[in-house]
Amino acid sequence: MAAHQEEGADVSLFEAIDVSVSYGAVKALDGVSISLEPGIVHGVIGPNGAGKSTFIDGLSGRTRLTGGRVMLDGENVTARRPAWRRHRGISRSFQRTSVFPAMTVGDQFDMVADRMNEEDLDGIVDALQLRGVLAQVCSEIAYGTQRSVDLALALIGRPRVVLLDEPCAGLVADEGVTMLNHIRTLCKERDVAAILVEHDVDGVFRTCDEVTVLDLGRILVSGKPGDVRKDERVIRAYLGSAG
Amino acid sequence: MSRSSRSCYGARWASPGSGSEVSDTDLRPISLDALAGAAAPRLNRRTALIAGAGAALVLGAGLLMPVVVRGASAFGLIFDAVMFAFLTMSIAFLVRHLGIVSLGHTAFFGGSAYTVAIATTVGGMGMIPAAALGLLVGVVLAVLMGAIVVRASGMTFMMLTLALGQAVYQVVVLQIARPWTGASDGTSLSYIAGDSFFGVPPDQVVNPVGFWPVVWIVFVLSIVALWFVGRMKFGRVLQGIRENEERMRFSGYDTVRPRFLAFVVSGTVASIGGVLFALNASYVSPELLSFFRSGDALIATLLGGTGLLVGPVVGALIYMILLSTLNSTGNLQLYLGAALVIVLAFLPTGVTGAIVTGVKRLWRRIRRKGPM
C-alpha cells in the first residue's frame, strides 16, 4: 500500500516524488508520490477538492510545484516547460475540452501531427472513431466527439505518458464507458503509461490496473483496484459518502 | 512551397467548402474572434497558381491606374489610400492571424519615414541607401517592440504597443532631437540631383503619378507576401495560437517565437510603407507617429474588415474618401466615429466581410432555387 515511498532506487518510466502544490496557505497537494510503468493505467480518484486536477496540472507543467520532483526515466523534468515535456513524451488532455474550435478536426490533427512527427495518425483517428468528422469544424461537432478530439490530440506523436484529466467529464453514461474502453485499449496497444483522473469511481475500478485515492491533497490509499475498493478508509472517506 | 503543400493529410482532409476566407464563424457578436479570420484554406499548387495569376493581373491592371484615373485629386486619393494601406494591412495581419490589436505600428511606419528623412539630410545619402536604412530601422524597432510585447495579449498588448509607439513620438519631438528630426516642426528630405530610385528621378518620386509604378509593385508584392505567410504552415500555427495557445504549448509548439515572427513581419510591411511615404511626401512630421494616426489606422482597418486580405485596403480607401469629403466640415473625427459605430454594430466583419457574406447568401439562394 505504501510502496511508493521506497521506489526511488529503480528507475520508473515516470515518477512523481513528494509533489506538493500550495495556493497561498492552502495546500492543494501535499507530498503525493506516484510511479508509472508502460502499459499501466493508473486511476486517481477522490472527492471534490482532493487535488486531482491540481495533480495533473503539476505533473504536466501547467502549475508550478511548490515542492517535490517529477522524473522521466530518472531525469528530473520538474522545471521543464509543457512543450519540452510533450516532445519527451509527456502528454495530457483537459477536463474542460481544449481543442481548436474554428479549425477542422482534420486540420488540427494534421497540425499537431506535423509538429510531433506522428506517422500513424490514421491509427488514432480510427481507434477513436473520428474519421467521419475530419472535415468538420470542431466547434460544430457533438460535445462527446470533441472530448474524443481532445484525447486524440494528446495521443498524437506516440507519447509515453498521458495524463488524462477527467476525459469523461460531461459525457452521458454510454459515451463514458466507450471513452474509458478506448483509453484502456489505446494504452495497452501503444504501451503508454497513463494517469486517469476521473469522477466515475466504478469506471476507474473497471478500467485501471492501479488506483490511487486522494483526499485533501494527500494519498489515502494506493494499490490494486480490488484492494482499494475494499479498504475501509476509502469506503469511509469517499465511497461511503457517494452511497 | 512544395514542402508545405505536400503534407500527408492536408490535401485529403481539406474540406470541400473551404474555398473562401470568411466563414459563418465570423458572424459572432463583436469580439476580436469575430474580427479575426476563419480557418484559412491550405496552400496547394492550384491555389498558389490561381493566386499568382490573380496577383499578376492585379499588378498589371494597377499599373494602368494613372491612365484610367485622370483627375489629379482622384488619383491622389488612391495613392494616399495605398500608402495608408501599408499601415492598415500590417495591423490587420496581426488581428487576422493572432487576434491582437496593435496601436504601435505608427512607430514602424513613422520611424522608417523619419529615418529616410534624416538619412537624406543629416546623412546626405541617396534615395536607395536611405530607403534601405529606413527599412532596417523600422525592422529593428519591430524586433525591439516585439521582444517586449510578444507575451502580452488582449488589452495588455494594446496598451503596451500604444505606450511604446508614443515613446517613439516623444523621442522625435524632443528639443534635443531638433537638429535631426525638426522636433514638432518635422523635417524635409533633401534629394541629390541626378539620383534615382529604381529608375525614378527625384522629381518623379515626389509626383504620385511618376512614383506610382514603384509603389504599386511593392504594394502588390507585400500583399502576396502576407498572403503566402498566412497560407504556409506558419499561418496555421498562428491560427492554432490564436484559438488555443495553451493547447498549442501542450501539443509541443513554442508559441512565443511564432508570435514574435508575425509581429516582425507585420512591422516590416508597415516600415516599407513608411519608407515609400517619406520618399514621396519629401516631408515628415510628428503627426505620422501620433496617437491619432494609430487610432485612424485601426478605424480604417475595422471599417474594411480583417477577414479578407483586401479588407484593410478597402478600409484605407474608405478612410481617404471620408477624409477628402468630410474634412472640410472640420468634424472629421465625429463622422469617422459614427461610421465606425455603424460598421461595428451592423457589419462586425467590416465592409468586405459584409459583402462576402451577402454574396454567399445570394449564391446559396440562387443555388437553392436553381433545381426547382
Image: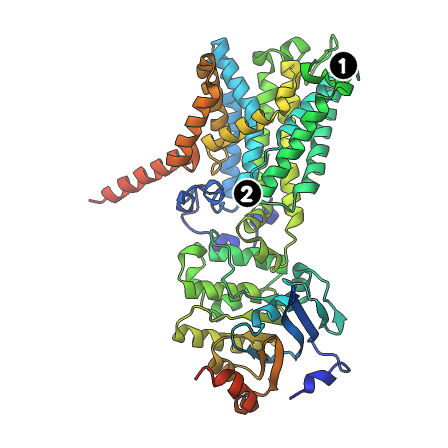
Q: Distance between the Cα atoms at labels 2 and 1? A: 38 Å
Give the chain of mark 1: B
On screen, residue B261 versus residue B20, left or right, reads right
The percent coordinates of residue B279 (x first, y second) are 66, 17
On screen, residue A210 versus residue B352, left or right, reads right
The percent coordinates of residue B107 (x first, y second) are 66, 29
Q: Which residue is mark 2?
A: B97
Q: Residue at x 39, y 45 (%)?
A: B24
Which sits earlier in the primary sequence, circle 2 or circle 1? 2
State the colouring used for the structure image: rainbow
Label 1: which secondary element: helix
Q: Which residue is mark 1?
A: B121
Q: Residues within 10 Å of mark 2 (few under 14, many from 20)?
A: many
Q: Is residue B227 visible?
A: no
Q: Is residue A108 visible?
A: yes
Toward the right, the furthest residue is: B123
Toward the front, the furthest residue is: A25
User: Which picture quadrant has residue B260?
Assistant: top right
Tell me the amino acid under the disc marked 2.
Answer: His
The percent coordinates of residue B188 (x first, y second) are 69, 12
